[in-house]
Image (cartoon, helix red, strand yellow):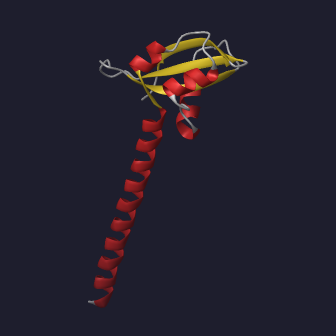
Amino acid sequence: MRSGRKFAVGCLISVIAFAGLATVGGFWMYSEVKQAGIHQREFEAVTVGMSRDEVGKRVGAGAGGTVRKGLQSEEPPRKGSDCIYGVALLDKPPVGRSYAYRFCFTGNRLVEKMAFALRSH
């Protein structure tokens, strides 16, 4: 009887630990995507020729870490040497399709802004 109880307690602890890790992982991913999100109206307000600071005030720092690497892996060829990426938060998102925004700079000036469809989501 004791070994059955120990087994049950072990299983319960494992389930609780797994649920806790899944919750923390989900929250982390949500916060990464939320930080990387750029609203459509902000994208539209940015114009080529703006300084990096002006763009940053509109769209923030853009995606970092895992989200940035994922967006870079799907991007089309770019003009600038240094880019800010963001997950597109569209007013009317198309069903089954995700988009990203990219702002590329040469020096301190924006030389390209574009929206591109992501292949995987």
Q: Quadrant of residue 52?
A: top right
Instruction: Indicate the position of residue 118 as horizontal and vertical percent values.
Output: 46, 22
On screen, 110 above or below 26? above
Instruction: Indicate the position of residue 110 as horizontal and vertical percent values.
Output: 63, 14
Name the outermost residue toward the left: 1
Nearer the observer, 47 or 88: 47
Q: Residue at x 57, y 21 (%)?
A: 54
The answer to whether residue 74 shows anywhere in this view is no
Nearer the observer, 52 or 29: 52
Q: Residue at x 58, y 15 (%)?
A: 76
- Relative horizontal placement of residue 79, taking residue 74 as reference (left or right): right
Q: Residue at x 60, y 11 (%)?
A: 112
Q: Quadrant of residue 34?
A: top left
On screen, 69 above or below 113? below
Q: Residue at x 54, y 10 (%)?
A: 47
Q: Quadrant of the N terminus?
A: bottom left
The answer to whether residue 96 shows anywhere in this view is yes
Name the outermost residue toward the bottom: 2
Q: Quadrant of the C terminus?
A: top left
- Relative horizontal placement of residue 86, taking residue 104 as reference (left or right): left
Instruction: Indicate the position of residue 88 as horizontal and vertical percent values.
Output: 43, 23
Count of picture labels: 0
